[in-house]
Structure formats: C-alpha cells, structure tokens
Image (cartoon, coloured by chain):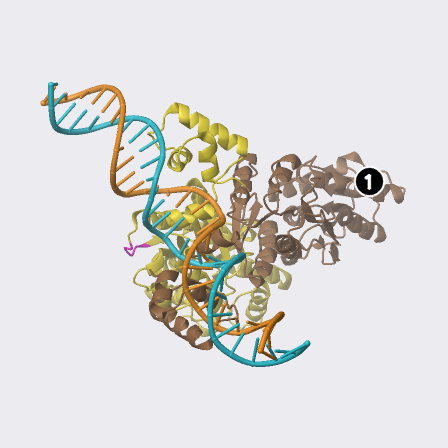
Chain colours: A yellow, B brown, C cyan, D orange
Amino acid sequence: MANIREIAKLAGVSVSTVSRVLNNHPYVSEQKRAEVMRIIQERNYVQNSNAVHLSTGKTMVVGVTLPLVNNQYYSSIIEGIAGEAARHQYNLMVCQTNNSAEQEQSILRLLKNKKMDGLIMCSRANGCETIDEYAQYGPIITCEANEAVFVSSVHIDHYQTFRIGMEYLLGKGHRKIGYCIGRKNSFNSQHRKRAYHDMLQSAGVTPAPEWAFENCLTVQDGKDIAHRIWQMNERPSALIVSCNHIAAGIVKEAGRLGLRVPEDLAIVGCDDQPVGELLEITTVSSPSSLMGKYAFEMLYDRIVHQHKEKEERELPPLLVERGTT
Amino acid sequence: MANIREIAKLAGVSVSTVSRVLNNHPYVSEQKRAEVMRIIQERNYVQNSNAVHLSTGKTMVVGVTLPLVNNQYYSSIIEGIAGEAARHQYNLMVCQTNNSAEQEQSILRLLKNKKMDGLIMCSRANGCETIDEYAQYGPIITCEANEAVFVSSVHIDHYQTFRIGMEYLLGKGHRKIGYCIGRKNSFNSQHRKRAYHDMLQSAGVTPAPEWAFENCLTVQDGKDIAHRIWQMNERPSALIVSCNHIAAGIVKEAGRLGLRVPEDLAIVGCDDQPVGELLEITTVSSPSSLMGKYAFEMLYDRIVHQHKEKEERELPPLLVERGTT
DNA sequence: ATAAAGTGTGGAACGCTTTTCATAGCAAGA
DNA sequence: TCTTGCTATGAAAAGCGTTCCACACTTTAT
C-alpha cells in the first residue's frame, strides 16, 4: 500500500507537507491541502501507525493487568478505564496475569519496550521494588493501595468499607457480628479485619473467634459458612461479608436451612456485583467503574505531563440498604 | 536508552549480529553471542517494539470489539480469547463500541493502519459490506453468524439452543410452553423463535400467543413476566428464557408470588451466567469462553497462513439440568 | 523605508530493527 | 585439486512518518 512518499510525489509536494496535512498543522495553503487530500483519498492511504509510534515515541495504548477478565469486579474497572481512554483516543491492552508474577513481568516489559505508554494494574503479583523499577519506563497506577515510591494508586478504602458496614450493623443493635473475608493475609483483608475489631472495641464488644471466616472465595464457601453457622450453639446475629457472591451463597443456603434472613442472620456485603441487587443484599458498594475512570485520568495526566509524583486517591464506599438487614 | 547500534558498537560487532542474537538466529559464534548478551545486560537494553513492528509488519496484537466489557457473556468470550492469545505471545486490544457503527469503524481502521494483526468482533454494528471491505487489511472473525464473504465466524447455534431446551421440556411432558427473548427482530431471536415454533409444531401443539414474551432485557423485565403469568387465567407450565438473568428475575418474583418453581412453572435458561448456577436454574449452556478460544485459533491460523477462506464454526450448546425443571 | 514577524514549503536527519545480499573462511565430497 | 556447501559476519536497504532547520516570500509595525 501507498506510503507518505508516494503521496507526496503524486501530489507534487514534499513529504513534510503531506505530514502537515495529515496532522492538521497550519501553514499549508488551501490549494495544496486539497490536492494532498485528493490523492490520499484516491490512493486510499492511511498512516502506518507503527511508523508513527516509532517516530513520536508514543503508542496511544495503555495496558491493564488483572488476574482474570471474567470477573465482575475487574470488568467493571475496565469499563471505567475504557470509557475514559476512548475519550482521549487511547486504546486498551488488556492483560490477564492469572496472578502469576512472571506473566505480570512480561507485561511490565511491554512498558519498557514501548508497546504501551502507561500501565494500570488492577492487581499485582510482584513486589513494590519490581514495580518501581519499571515505573521509570512509563507511568504506572495501581487500583489498590501500594507502598511503591513512584507508583500512584486509586483505591477503595477497605477499612472504611468495613467500618461503614459495622457501624450500620451496630446501629441496628447487633452485637454478635461475624465477618467473612477472602485471602487471609492480603493487604485488603488486613484493613478489613482491623476495621472490624476497631468498631467492635469502640462498642465495647468482644467478638467470638469462631465467627471469623477466612479464605472465603467461592459461592460454595458461602454455603459452607451458612452450614457452620446453622450448627453453632451460639450464632452470630449478623455477618459482614467481603464479596456479594459469598453473601449470596450464604443467603441461599440459609434459606434452605430455615435460617431466616435478616431475622436470624443479617448480612451486609461489600461490593457492586449484580447478584447483590438480584438477591437484594444490603451492601457497602465500592465504585469500581469510577475507580477505573480515575485510574485512567491519573495515568493520562502523567503520560502527558511526564511527572512521577506519587498520589494516592481513596474512594469512599457507599451503603446501599436492601433486604438482608 | 540504548539502541541496537550502541550495543553493536560496545560489543564490537555489527548491528546484524546483535539482531541475530536477539532473535536467536543460528550462525552467531558462541563468543560473540556471549559478549553481546553481556553488553545487553549491562546496558539494560530491550528492543523498541515499535521499530520491530515497523520492520516486520506485524504487531502481535489482536483486537476485540464488543458493545461493553462489563457483561458476563462478553467477558467470558474475552477470557477464552485471552488465554489462547497468551499461548501464542499475542496481546489483546479490547475495544468497546457501545454498539455505535462509528466507533466500530474507528476500530476497523486500526486494522487498516496496522495497529493490529487481526480482529475478533463479538458484536457488530456495521453492515457486512463494510466489514468485508476492511477484511482485506487483515483477518476478521465474528462471534456470531455473518453473511460477509471474507469474514469467518464461530458462533453458538441459537436454533439448536432453543431446540434442545424445547425438546427437554416436551420430553418432561410439558405442552403449555412459553418463551422469553431479547430484541424482537435480531438475527438470534429469529432463530430462537423458529426453533420454538418448529418444536411445538412437531409435537402437535399450538402455542398461546400471550405466552410469548419479547424485548426482555433486564432482571426487572423478568420480574414483570412473573407477574403477568401469575395473573393469567391459563398459565404456561414452562418457559424457555434466552438469558439467565431474566430467568433469575422470574424465579425470584415467582417465589414471592407463591408460584412454585418448577411445580407450577418450570424454567429453562439459555446461557452460562453464574447467576444460573447460584439460583440453580436449568440452562442450555452456550460455551462462550470456548467460542473465544476458537475465534482466536481461527484468527491466528489466518494471520500465520495469510489465507481468507470463509469458515463457519457452530458450537453445540449443552443442557445443564438444575433445580428449575 | 526598514526591521520584525508571520506564512508556506522543502530537505534531511531521526526514530530503530530486520533482512537481503555480499564476502570470506573452512571443511567435506568428487 | 577443485568444487560445493556451510558457518559467520558486516554493509546497506527497506520499512514509514515526524520534525527541526533553512530559505523565501509577505505583511505589519516602527
């Protein structure tokens, strides 16, 4: 296919002039501009974007890492990123890491070799030192709190999330409150647990250790929890649950076991999954799509202005009262 | 940062030799290879992928168009594509079209200007002529049936889906069967309706027209349907529903109204949404992730072997019996 | 009238790697 | 001994667009 040199020759102008036309630079006479356009049309010419990228040093691509796409939380972040990226003519490279540090590194390398202008990490498998090292090649934003020096973040305040949920349950008179969280020692889980304990302490309540459910990941885990609660001598009257699909498992199984929700067991979930709406689960919703939008905004600012200032933006969660409390 | 010339100079070899080392070409002596590697390490050099792309004419990127990412069906297709793409060192550019023909064209243009090597269209807003036109610049695969000349497809056989569901319900003795579909006149809906009527006809049953529910899109639509059925003098004994979130709405609301599922109303859904599993909805599952995998396979084959033969691959759906029948 | 500022255009360097072609040494086969 | 056929390596072209610099011609301001 035609290239810029051929267009220049056919239009009887220099390559520079064609380039100016393509990029809407001023200082091209209407005559020549028209003629160049005519030839471009005629020859069905478009720029080779790889040449443009090579020449400008930009790709108009941002990357996104996540463990897996097929997950409501992550795809909702992507949605936020994608919308904002499109507004700025940026394309999105979505990269599944499967939580593997190696796969993640292979993506970080894409930043180094200029396949992308910046990177948003929705999750992270490598240590902060590693990420920091790659941050010299292009801006990186994480969608969770991080301790890196050059990596900014926009994240949901998980402490707040649990605090709001706990405050709400305490306000409703609950004192026997349990919790369910995912990976036991993840950064997020730590915060959640702290909020749980802080709130109970300030209410002067000592929690029963058997009401703490950790490593809850699947719907089935939720069902199992319902079972375990059902068999307890002293049951909690309420649960705060980190994810709504877990909460859904609990609600469904509780129903089957004759454990009434919310009368026997009140439940507060902690995310935005549609299943929460469907099963009418009260939830402390986290604005994940908005988080994506902000992540891109921050990234874009750093791409354009080439600064590396660390910024941490926390998004406040919002309580959505529904039927399980 | 360093470029290949600098590495060559420092290693005391030619640029070609460095390139050979980088690309694992034979015909480089162990000595020089080692020395080049040493310098590469030392200078922390990596190739500039834009230069590589320009030179090779390939980008190792495939695009995916879809109306929105935040949707179980589409993200499950992406998952399938992503897994297979990663195996072949391909990156994924995910492009939301919001069903806009213009936005879709801006993505098709990325194929023309070599920003991607091929394109998978999960949905399509432009006519086949338009798509065909762009297919000359790189292979395109759609994840739904299409009538284009140069565009292959891998898709779920929606006629089969409904046929299987209907056969199953008829086999269980149901004769009073209704259906719920989405957009009334979409390609897919046409096929579904045809299957519905064909199956009833071959069973010698004439359907009541008020059991046909069209334009069902949201969970709320499902709830409304439950209401309407509840108020009918003569109710259908079973429903075949195109999406499980609609089915979920029906199930939930039926429960509230005292309409027993499956005793009073059996329900068969028609996709893979996790809500189906959660609410134990019997479903004719469509292997959307597998569809993505196959789509990439077909695309990859066309990228590598540069052929344009039209191929249409239909995926058989699979009945998953659960609690609503 | 004269300097300064603005407009319009072309040449050439620059961004970086891959790949083809040419060359040369050396070993194996005829 | 002479030809083939490898192995090893470098020079240079090809892939393509952007942008800086230089030059020339108009205007406008002083």
Q: Nearer the viewer, residue A275 or A268?
A: A275
Q: Is residue A311 magenta?
A: yes
The spot of residue A110 in percent (x, y) is 44, 59
Q: Is residue D18 above or below residue C7?
A: below
**Magenta stretch, residue numbers:** A308-312
Secondary structure of residue under mark 1: helix
Q: Quadrant of residue B16?
A: bottom left
Screen quadrant of the C terminus of chain B = bottom right
Residue with the mark numbered 1? B197
Determine the residue positioned at 40% across, 37% down.
A15
In the image, taking residue B84 as reference, residue B185 lies left or right, namely right
Could you tell me residue A80's position as x and y percent?
A: 45, 47
Which quadrant of the figure contains the N terminus of chain B? bottom left
Q: Front-most of A262 and A243?
A: A243
B34 or B151: nearer the viewer? B34
Mark count: 1
Which residue is rendered at x = 44% and y = 25% of the image? A34
Determine if residue A290 is in view: no
Is residue A208 at all visible to an observer of this figure? yes
> Residue A149: within the magenta?
no
The local crowd at label 1, few if under 14, some if 14 to 19, many if 20 or more residues have their Cα within 10 Å, is: some
The subunit letter for the residue under badge 1 reads B
